[in-house]
Image (cartoon, rainbow, N blue to C red):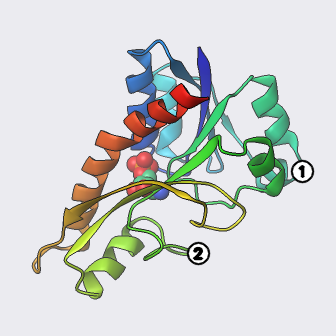
């Protein structure tokens, strides 16, 4: 059984979806949820599902103690699902090709610093795009920059609000993130 750690800074609906998906699956389970935000809703989601969770500080992230914790918990694979901090080099290197991020747009467009949550969907609507989507990619030391593993699209209609776009993108995330994670775990 492979052990997944999920990093999330906010709502955590993708984290919850991953937890539930892998509960029904013999390949892996979500063994640890990490957040940098003590008020994040992901904490109560993890609690409700009896998944160990921890609040980490920026110092712990950069001074090696988060990496230590991942090792101590025998984590095989890391998913960033709405995690807003940069992951430091030590973690990226230790989990080379075993750390992925989900981004709510079609990278390389609408990525980089500040491009998270509703900001992304606002930018897509403001630019008059007629499609957007999701990108699942490996994590390197730059925001939204590692090799792309998977993308899929959804239409954006002229009268769509950023909230409408967010809803469609979330539906894609729910549908594909667990499945792509599973495929990557099968190759480990
Ligand atoms: C998702 O849209 C994900 O693509 C992005 O942050 C959002 C997190 O949503 N990286 P949630 O916290 O999983 O509900």
Residue ranking furthest to the front: 187
Residue closest to the eye, 52 or 17: 17
Residue ranking furthest to the bottom: 127
Could you classify mark 2 by the number of other residues whose Cα lies within 10 Å: few (under 14), some (14-19), or many (20 or more)? few
Residue closest to the eye, 76 or 126: 76
Going by the image, does 142 lie left or right of 183?
A: right
Mark 1 and mark 2 lie on one chain; the one further toward the N terminus is: 1
Residue 91 percent location from the top left of the image: 78, 47
Q: Please identify the quadrant where the C terminus is shown.
A: top right
Could you classify mark 1 by the number of other residues whose Cα lies within 10 Å: few (under 14), some (14-19), or many (20 or more)? few
Q: Residue at x 42, y 16 (%)?
A: 25
Dot 1 and dot 2 residues touching (CB under 8 Å): no
Residue 141 percent location from the top left of the image: 72, 63
* Residue 174: mark: none
Q: Residue at x 43, y 17 (%)?
A: 23
Q: Secondary structure at mark 2?
A: loop
Going by the image, does 51 lie left or right of 159?
A: right
Q: Residue at x 23, y 72 (%)?
A: 131
Image height of 119 relative to 95, above or below = below
Q: Secondary structure at mark 1?
A: loop
Image height of 85 relative to 31, above or below = below
Residue 71 percent location from the top left of the image: 80, 29
* Residue 113: mark: 2
State whether residue 12 appears in this view: yes
Q: Please identify the quadrant where the N terminus is shown.
A: top right
- Which residue is tagged 1? 63
Image height of 144 relative to 185, above or below = below
């Amino acid at each position: 059984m492979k052990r997944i750690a999920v990093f999330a800074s906010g709502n955590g609906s993708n984290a919850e979806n991953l937890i539930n998906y892998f509960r029904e699956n013999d390949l892996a389970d979500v063994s640890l949820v990490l957040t940098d935000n003590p008020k994040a809703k992901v904490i109560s989601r993890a609690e409700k599902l009896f998944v160990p969770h921890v609040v980490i500080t920026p110092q712990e992230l950069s001074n090696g103690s988060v990496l230590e914790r991942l090792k101590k918990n025998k984590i095989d694979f890391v998913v960033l699902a709405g995690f807003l901090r940069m992951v430091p080099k030590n973690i990226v290197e230790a989990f080379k090709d075993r750390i992925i991020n989900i981004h709510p747009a079609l990278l390389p467009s609408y990525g980089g610093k500040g491009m998270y949550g509703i900001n992304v969907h606002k930018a897509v609507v403001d630019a008059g795009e007629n499609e957007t989507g999701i990108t699942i990619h490996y994590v390197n030391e730059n925001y939204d920059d590692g090799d792309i593993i998977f993308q899929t699209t959804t239409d954006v209609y002229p009268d769509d609000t950023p909230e409408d776009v967010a809803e469609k993108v979330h539906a894609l995330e729910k549908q594909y993130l667990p499945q792509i994670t599973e495929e990557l775990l099968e190759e480990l």
